Image (cartoon, rainbow, N blue to C red):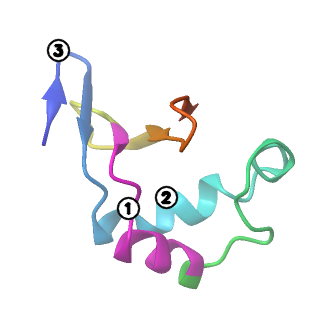
Amino acid sequence: MRLEDDAILLREFTEEDVPAIVAACQDPEIARWTRVPSPYTEADAREFLKDPPDRAFAVVDRSSGELLGAIGARPEEDGRVEIGY
């Protein structure tokens, strides 16, 4: 699934995203506010790619293809939805 406009593309993650995922996840604020392991390794990124959340998208600069971030939503058992970006 892909969603896009003139500037941004939302798409599934790919193997080519591994270096950018690893680099982004070195930010200590990500480990502080999320469940992302720290230090985050290439093996962690590859494991994520094996079974990404159902509603997770890579946020990509449409013109350059640069991975800018991620956004996703995960339904919880109690009917709430956890949103991450």
Q: Which residues are magenta?
A: 44-59
Which quadrant holds residue 85? top right
Q: Amino acid at mark 1?
A: Asp
User: Which residue position is annotated with label 1?
Assistant: 17
Q: Are the residues tagged 2 and 1 within 8 Å (C-beta)?
A: yes
Label 3 residue SS? loop
- The answer to whether any part of residue 63 appears in the image is yes
User: Which residue position is annotated with label 3?
Assistant: 6
Does the magenta portion include 58? Answer: yes
Q: Earlier in the sequence, mark 3 or mark 2?
A: 3
Please state if 17 lies on the left or on the right of 29 as rendered.
left
- Residue 17 screen position, x and y as percent: 37, 62
Please state if 35 lies on the left or on the right of 75 as rendered.
right
Position of 70 relative to 81 (above/below): below
Quadrant where the N terminus is found in the figure? top left
Residue 20 marker: 2
The CA span between labels 2 and 1 is: 5 Å
